[in-house]
Amino acid sequence: MLSLISPVKSPYHKVPPGPKFFLLMVASILLFLNGNLYFQASALVVVLGLYLVPGMAFFTAGLRMLWPLWPFVVIVFLWHTLTFDIVSGLVIIMRMFSAVALANLVTMTSQLDDVIALVTRVATPFRRFGLKPKVLALLIALFIRFLPVLIEKGNLLVESWRSRSTRRAGWRVVVPLALLALDDAEMVAEALRARGGLEPDEV
Amino acid sequence: MAKSGHLILNGITLDLTTSRIGFVGRNGSGKSSLARVVCGLIKPDQGQVLVDEIDVYKDRRRALSKIGILFQNPDHQIIFPTVFEEVSFGLIQQGHNKDTVRHLVADALARFGKADWTNRSVSALSQGQRHLVCLMSVLAMQPSVIVLDEPFTGLDRPITRQLTQMLSDIPQTLLHISHDLNSLRDYDRVIWLERGTIQLDGTPQTVLPAYCAAMDALGGQDAFADIPG
Amino acid sequence: MEKNIVIIALFAALIAALGLVPKFTLASGIPITAQSMGIMLCGTVLGSRRGAQAVLLFLLLVAIGLPLLAGGRGGLGVFGTPWAGFLFGFPFAAFAAGLIMERWRSDNIPLVAGCAAAIGGIAALYAVAVPYYMVAVSAGLDQALVTAMLPFMPGDILKAILAGYITAGLAKARPDSLLSRA
């Protein structure tokens, strides 16, 4: 399963996800509370510095992850230039890059399993709201197990379409895919029940 | 042709002129990729695929009337809820008008004696019946060549025999990928694909026993160790 | 019970699959994909509660770092943009769509599902996304509407209509598949 974690080793990889998420939360709040241009500029410099620590490979990988933001930059830039409000436009853009880059940093340096463990741990106090950690773990496991299957089936259906049409696959392909998802759900639920299902106190 | 960093098909040059050609090979040997390249779904990195002089990847419009493909599992292939819609889909895409489409669908169904299936819901059909719907959908488009990518996997013997019988009657050239070596015995030519290249190419009498022997030998060792991945 | 859990996981996977399988992208600059249609479908097919849960599961998995958003995006970073309001609005969209499917008991499924998808996937979604954008960017309503809503509207309306047809297609093929109408 594809993940976004960076293969380039960094000192951040060794830090457990809990503290990283907490720091991220604090930093994000600070970023969004402050609208000062110089503050945002310095913050961005600091964030970029954090990316440089593990080396150029890591830095460029991080920059690449920021590329999808370009439409946002264009829109914000255009609007704020047209309304002669360039300073606040810059603040918004810089803040966005800092926030997203920091968040990406956490994602790039945290192992999936550790994060899942963190999530299930954090979810424990929410038991009373009906979310049991074991159920959550099962949901995640089922998702990861079946996503490649659905993608595969989606691809096959698209191939079936393309082998008979010059047009791009249309919405009609979604119907059989959704049906396959429903059927798979049926079968998996049966398999789960056959293996004892979920214990009564977990239901 | 390369995919995710390693070569799937390497240096394949084939001139297929006989009407019944079989393809054998282990899983992962590139057979499915070859099927897709041949019917124009995937672009070859080098070279081209020509069916009746038409480049099936570049000229998709004309390729539709030249080559069709039947995949393994009808549930991953049938897009529409009724037989009529499924069979007529390709015909509409080929540009026929509504009346012509209706006639062609009726012909396609009648050919197999299934005229009463026109408005049947696909969900109400059995696995074997769904395979037939897929076959009829491809045949309706009247291609010169049909690629069959292990189309009878998982079907019981009687249905497989019936469908094989139906296939043997059709005039199109068949490129049949199969693990069921029996179905290829009467073919004109069999090609053995191994790790993206042609291992052996000749008559079924030449290729099939060699292939069997090799597969048996592998089964004797640790067959799982060899799975490319 | 197991059925609930499994169907929620599978529909969350369906949302992801709709973003990852290269199907169709509706034009208009910013690439829009079938993914947000998946959100609508969670509501119209699974109903309000399970639909919202499927979407929440999807968002959780995006947050923990899986590249599930159209374009292979994911991780916490996507929640840091001014457009993150859309992500936060997704569960509400599914919930609203599901609610309408459950309450409006007409037999004209394409109509009901289409409206449910529109009210959920557009009205409810933008009710969250636009204010979020306004706060994140300190923008006025006019700017928010022009930059955060207008570009997406045509695509979203089309998607709502299609979601209606898809839901109807599912109902026809497998009448008891619509858990929202169970």
Image (cartoon, coloured by chain):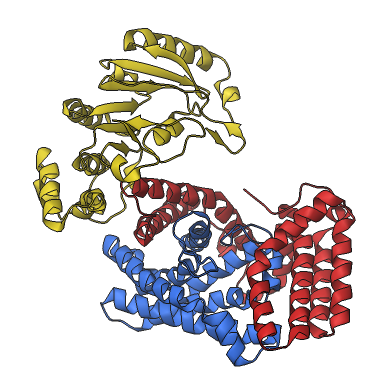
In the image, the chain rendered in blue is C
Residue found at x 35% / y 68%: C167
- On screen, residue A15 versus residue A110, left or right, reads right
Tell me: residue C172, above or below residue A10: below
What residue is rendered at 35% in x and 33% in y? B153
Question: Where on the picture, by quarter, is residue B189?
Answer: top left
Establish if B87 lies above or below A44. Answer: above
Which sits in the foreground, A17 or A120? A17
Where residue A122 sits, quadrant-wise, is: bottom right
**How far from the left and from the top, in percent, is residue C172?**
27, 64
Left or right relative to A105: residue C105: left
Residue sitting nearer the eye, C107 or A162: A162
Task: Please state the horizontal and vertical placement of residue A134, each as a whole percent of the image.
Answer: 64, 60
- C166 vs A149, left or right, is left
Residue A112 placement: quadrant: bottom right
Q: Which chain is red?
A: A
- Closer to us: B191 or A63: A63
Q: Nearer the viewer, residue C173 or B113?
A: B113
Chain B colour is yellow
Q: How many marks?
A: 0
Residue C99 x %, y %: 43, 81
Let me know if residue A55 appears in the view: yes
In this orientation, does residue C182 appear? no
Indicate left or right for B1 with A153 as reference.
right
